[in-house]
Every structure is written in C-alpha cells, then in structure tokens.
Amino acid sequence: MANAPLTSDTPVVVVANRLPVDQVSQPDGTAQWRTSPGGLVAALEPVVQATKGTWVGWPGVPDTPLEPFDVDGMRIVPLDLSAEDVADYYEGFSNGTLWPLYHDVTGEPVFERRWWESYCDVNARFARAVDLEASEGAIVWVQDYQLQLVPALLRERRPDLRIGFFDHIPFPGYEIYARLPWRRQVVEGLLGADLVGFQRGGDAANFLRAARGTCGAATRGSVIECGGRQLRAAAFPISVDAAALDELARRPETIQRARTLRHEFGDPETLILGVDRLDYTKGILHRLRAYGELLDDGDLHPPETVLVQVASPSRERVEEYQRLRNEVEVIVGRINGDHSDLGHPAVHYLHQTFPKEEMAALYLAADVLLVTPLRDGMNLVAKEYVACRHDEHGALVLSEFAGAADELRQALLVNPWDIDGTKEAIRRAVAITPQEAARRMRSLRRRVAEFDVHRWANAFLGALAMVAESREG
Ligand code: G6P
C-alpha cells in the first residue's frame, strides 16, 4: 500500500542542517532537548523512525561537541558548529544569501565571499561525518538549501552510496538564480545526487534550466546527463503524517482543550488563526495590514472576531528577522490600540513555540486559518490544519505562492500582495456557510490523507532506488 509507513532493510541516513531535536539550556544551567522548528523536521522524523535510521545534523547551539545517541527510535549523530560557523555558514550564506534569493528575492540577498567559504567548509564536514556513518551501499538522503554541496562531495568519497537530495524551499527562476556568484559550484554540488527532489514541478523545471545554463548539462524530461553520469530531477510534494494528526485531534483531551482555548480567547463568534515562523517570506505584515483594514472599515468587529497570531521565534540573530519582529509588533500594537476592548485584545500575538498537542487544539478551535506567505516551498501548517479538522469545520485561506496551493485547490486562494483581494478572501471565509465549509474541507482532507508524508517518502525513495539501479547497471 502506497501510504504504509516505510519499512526498509537499508536504514536511511538523513543529513540535515538541524537535528530533529535542539539542545536548549535551562535557567538552572542544565540542558534539555526540544523538537526543532520548521516543516522539514516535522516531515522527516516519522520517516527516520520508521526505518530505524540515522540523522546527522547540528544540535542548534554552537560549540557543543556531543557523542551520538539514540532518541525515539533514531540514531542521532550531532555535528558541532563553532560560533563562527553559525555566523557565516548558517546565518550568513544559508539565511542571508540563499534564503532570500531562493524565495524570489522577498528579502535582499547579501553576497559575501567569507560566508561562501564557510558554506564550503561546513558542507565538507557534513560529507565527512556521513562517510563515517554510512554503511556500504547505504541510502543517504540530504536535505535542503544549507547542504547543497554535500551530494557531490559525498559521491567523490563514497561512490557506493545511493544519494538523494530534497530541496524544501523554492528553486528560483534562472534570472534570479544566475545572480549567485557561485551558481555553477552549487549546481555541481547538487548534480552529485542520483535524484534531486523539489516541492513543485516549476522548481524542478527551474533547476533543470540552471543545470543547462551553468554546467552545460543535457536534459531530457526529468533526466539530466552531465559528465558521463545520469540523474533525475523531479517534483515530490512533501506532506504531513495525516493519520497521526487526525488521531491526535480526535482525542477527547484535544477537543476539550480546543473548547477551553476558545473560552480563553473570549468565546468569539469567529476565531481567525495565523501560525508561522516569524519570517519575512510568510507575509505576516501584509496579512496584518489586511486584517487591520477590515477592522477600520467596520467589516469585522472585535471581540466578536479575534485574530490569534502565533509567530514562533526564528533566526533571531539575523538583522532582517529582528527588523521584521519590530514591524510586526508595531502593527499589532496599533491594531490593538485602536480596536481592543478592556481585557479583550483584537489580536492575540504569541511570539512562542507550542508543542504539537497544543497546536492541534488551536487548529480545532479556529474557524479560519490564514496561510498567506509571499513565497513558500510547501507550507505544512496548511496541511496540518486540514488533517486535524475531522469535524469538517473551518475555512482555509491560502496563498497562491505556497507550494501547497498546487494541491489544496479547495482552499480560498489569494494573492497575498493584493491587500483588497486578501480582505475579500477573509470576509468570505468568515461568512462561509457550514455546508460550503464542509464540502471544501472534505475535498481537502481527501487530498491530504491520500498524499501523506509516508507516500512522499515512499515515492522519493522508490524513485531513488530506480535511478541508482539503472546507474549501477
Ligand atoms: C524551513 C527550512 C528548514 C529549516 C526550518 C527552520 O522549514 O526549509 O530547513 O530547518 O525552516 O529554520 P531554522 O533556520 O531554524 O532551521
């Protein structure tokens, strides 16, 4: 069955910048492990657990050498980064250069030679760590934009491995990509894989174009030929563990918690929810502007309607993120100043990360979920919401520029740059009839249940096995 959890005789070695758990220090000086942020971890954790595999990555704090250990059925191999690596490779090249560039320049990319050197150095260390960890013929699955050089570096050391790469974020059009001073080296890094996966067909097409443009590769459909080797680049839209989320959301304690939350938010007629990492690609400012105007125009009335915006802390040392936080807090303050009643804020702004149990309750409590990124590889929050709504209530307002929009056609789709269009979509979502909401939600739920994270992993690893077999003859 396509959606059965993966069982593999060959354990998968996942390599990602982050481990699925982050080490956080407590006020008393002790350290504790906590689930890492973001969609990548949420999607891959069940895959590594199902194959009893290994995860190589950074534990989230600099200068903390740690021995490998086991957690939740996974072998965890921590890779230590110094404070300088974090500044140059992670905050610099990954999040100051690649992140804005790949998200269609929603922020201004900075091209800094020192950051590039650090990126090369850290990618080489990841490749060495995997070399030590991977058994003969193992499957290695490299994740995301922080590690694009690892496939070729690893192939050089270990031609026996089957190497897959998955890009969780968009791959930009060539006119944008071509600005990168190291565009050839990055593509060469990726061409070391047997299979390069993307969220959307458009991302794969952009990459094929970049392979032709920078490395003179020949492409035929999804097949790439370069330097006497063949590989494939294709779309594999990532998803969530729909059955697990459905089960969590059906638990009596989750349902009860959703009721309590609504009560704590003042028992509004309409509870609107936004859930994002605090990132400039997520369109939080545009969304708040649209919401604020709806209140100014008298279309929505707090406290009958409230907005709950969860904005989880992210990349807090990067200047762009600090600026965004300030801007978000100014606009939330203005809306609340103008429109709150005593004891009833119009916007509940939570700069926090919540465990998945609490998130499931929040999803169940929300009449409307706003997912309006300016650009997003996939956006798993949209899929999590759908997977939790077993009651078939709730309306999803979704940006056309999220990968999820390709699949979730029954959402209310918006162009987040269009404030009037966003306001109209919010008005429609608030006024939706229960019948229309249920019809749309049923269709969304069918899609997410069928194309879940297990199917994604099976499809990717199945395609990887086929490419590698044909390569091995
Ligand atoms: C996105 C990226 C991931 C990243 C996550 C959290 O989902 O695709 O690679 O791990 O954001 O960001 P952070 O920088 O905290 O790892």
Image (spheres, grey):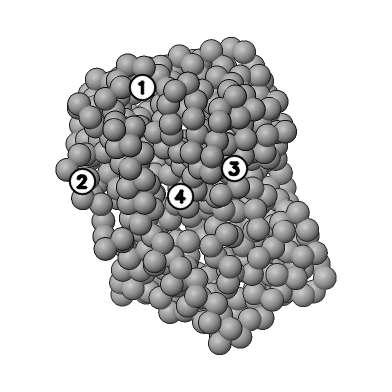
Q: Is mark 3 on a helix, strand or loop?
A: helix
Would you identify the image quadrant in which residue 455 lies?
A: bottom left
Quadrant for the C terminus, please. top left
User: What residue would you read off at disc 2?
Assistant: 8
User: What residue would you read off at disc 1?
Assistant: 155
- Is the residue under label 3 in contact with that under label 2 (CB below 8 Å)? no
User: What residue would you read off at disc 4?
Assistant: 236
Q: What element carries label 2?
A: loop
Q: Which mark is residue 205?
A: 3
Residue under the image location 50 percent in, 57 percent down: 381
The spot of residue 357 in percent (x, y) is: 36, 60
Residue toward you, 178 or 112: 178
Q: Earlier in the sequence, mark 3 or mark 4?
A: 3
Alpha carbon separation for disc pair 2 and 4:
19 Å
Q: The residue under label 1 is which amino acid type? A: Arg
Q: The residue under label 3 is which amino acid type? A: Ala
Q: Earlier in the sequence, mark 2 or mark 4?
A: 2
Does the numbered disc 3 mark a residue whose Cβ is under 8 Å from ligand 1?
no
Q: In this view, does 30 lie to the left or right of 219?
A: left
Q: The residue under label 2 is which amino acid type? A: Ser
- Is the residue under label 4 in contact with that under label 2 (CB below 8 Å)? no
Q: Which of marks 2 and 3 is nearer the N terminus?
A: 2
Alpha carbon separation for disc pair 1 and 2:
22 Å
Mark 1 neighbour density, 10 Å: few (under 14) some (14–19) many (20 or more): many
Q: Which of marks 1 and 2 is nearer the N terminus?
A: 2
Would you identify the image quadrant in which residue 187 lies?
A: top right
Alpha carbon separation for disc pair 3 and 4:
13 Å
Residue toward you, 471 or 203: 471
Residue toward you, 311 or 135: 135
Compared to residue 461, the image places residue 92 above or below, namely above
Q: The residue under label 4 is which amino acid type? A: Phe
Alpha carbon separation for disc pair 4 and 1:
23 Å
